[in-house]
Each structure stands twice: as structure tokens, then as C-alpha cells.
Image (spheres, grey):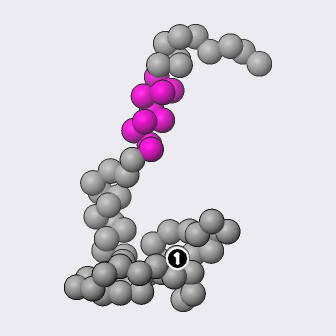
């Protein structure tokens, strides 16, 4: 396996940091899905998670549709 050059390591660390946090567009997209009661992600076993509350109530997530 090729060893990474230092500049590649710096780039990879910066790129990974950007991907570690959702963007404003991603937050907006998933908020809209939660408000519509659509799937909003995956649980630890890979099942689709659905929002179980509307926009005016506390968020509850369930892997049951």
C-alpha cells in the first residue's frame, strides 16, 4: 500500500471533517422529511427510521413505519 504524502493526509483530514457534520441543506432536507412523516435515516441495524411526530410536537423516531 502506498504511504500517503503529508499534503494528502491534511486534505483527507479536512475533507473528513466537512463530511462529519451535516450541511444546512442536509438539515433542511431532513427537517422537511420529518415534518412529512417520511423516513429520516437508518437505525443501527439498517432499518429505515420514520419521524413519529408533527412539526409542533417533540420529535420521536421509530423504525416501525
Q: Is residue 53 left or right of residue 15?
A: left
18 inside magenta stretch: yes
Circle 1 SS class: strand
What x and y, as percent, mark residue 7? 49, 12
Check if residue 9 falls in the magenta segment: no
**Camera-nearest residue between 32 and 51:** 51
For this orientation, the residue located farthest to the right is: 1
Q: Is residue 18 left or right of residue 64?
A: left
Determine the image quadrant of residue 35. bottom left
How many C-alpha atoms fall within 10 Å of the one at disc 1: few (<14), some, or many (≥20)?
many
Q: Magenta-highlighted stretch: main secondary structure?
A: helix
Residue 45, horizontal then vertical, whole percent: 67, 68
Q: Quadrant of the N terminus?
A: top right
Q: Quadrant of the C terminus?
A: bottom right
For image coordinates 44% across by 44% down, the residue present is 20
Which residue corresponds to mark 1?
49
Tell me where the magenta segment starts and ends, as one range. Answer: 11-20
Amino acid at each position: 500500500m502506498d504511504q500517503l504524502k503529508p499534503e494528502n493526509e491534511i486534505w483527507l483530514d479536512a475533507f473528513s471533517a466537512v463530511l462529519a457534520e451535516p450541511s444546512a441543506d442536509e438539515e433542511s432536507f431532513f427537517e422537511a422529511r420529518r415534518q412529512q412523516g417520511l423516513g429520516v435515516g437508518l437505525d443501527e441495524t439498517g432499518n429505515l427510521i420514520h419521524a413519529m411526530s408533527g412539526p409542533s410536537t417533540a420529535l420521536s423516531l421509530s423504525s416501525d413505519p
